[in-house]
Image (cartoon, rainbow, N blue to C red):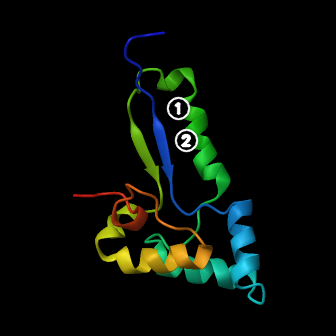
């Protein structure tokens, strides 16, 4: 093994996955998928919509390809601008965590937001 190993990371934001479908069914089963995801997107995502798995998969496939062989130690956000809203998001993030039943972990910054300058 090499003495120094750099990896790439992909930081995903709100991506429509089975986990989010479960959250929808637990929190608001009476709402349509469009209404539930639309309300969450308007509130938390600057781009205004949830991402799709293939939008993340495309980047991951590229990073695994030979064309990305010279990229090391990169941290790439696929989050529709979510990280840029963290300064005002502390209260909103607590509400979101409460809504999805997720508690902050030790070491989380601003309840889970990424630090941005």
Residue 29 picture location, percent across and down: 77, 84
Which residue sits at x=54%, y=78%?
98
Image spot of residue 58 (x, y percent)? 60, 42
Return the residue at label 1: 63
Asked if 88 appears above or below 56 in the picture, the reply is below
List the residue tagged with mark 2.
59
Q: Secondary structure at mark 1?
A: helix
Relative placement, left or right, of 41 versus 54 is left
- In which image quadrant can residue 76 be found? top left
Residue 27 in sight: yes
Left or right of residue 66, residue 114 in this image: left
Residue 31 pos. (x, y %): 74, 88
CB under 8 Å between discs 1 and 2: yes
Identify which residue is drawn at 39% across, 35% down: 74
Frontmost residue, 98 versus 81: 98
Disc 1 to disc 2, C-alpha distance: 6 Å
Which image quarter holds the C terminus? bottom left
């Amino acid at each position: 093994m090499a003495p120094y190993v750099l990896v790439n990371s992909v930081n995903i934001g709100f991506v429509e996955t089975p986990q989010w479908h479960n959250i929808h069914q637990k929190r608001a089963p009476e709402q349509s998928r469009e209404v539930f995801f639309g309300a969450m997107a308007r509130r938390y995502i600057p781009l205004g919509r949830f991402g799709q798995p293939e939008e993340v998969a495309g980047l991951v496939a590229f990073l695994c390809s030979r064309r990305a062989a010279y990229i090391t130690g990169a941290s790439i956000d696929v989050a529709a601008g979510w990280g840029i809203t963290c300064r005002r998001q502390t209260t909103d993030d607590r509400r979101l965590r409460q809504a999805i039943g997720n508690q902050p972990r030790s070491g989380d910054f601003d309840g889970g937001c990424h630090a941005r300058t």
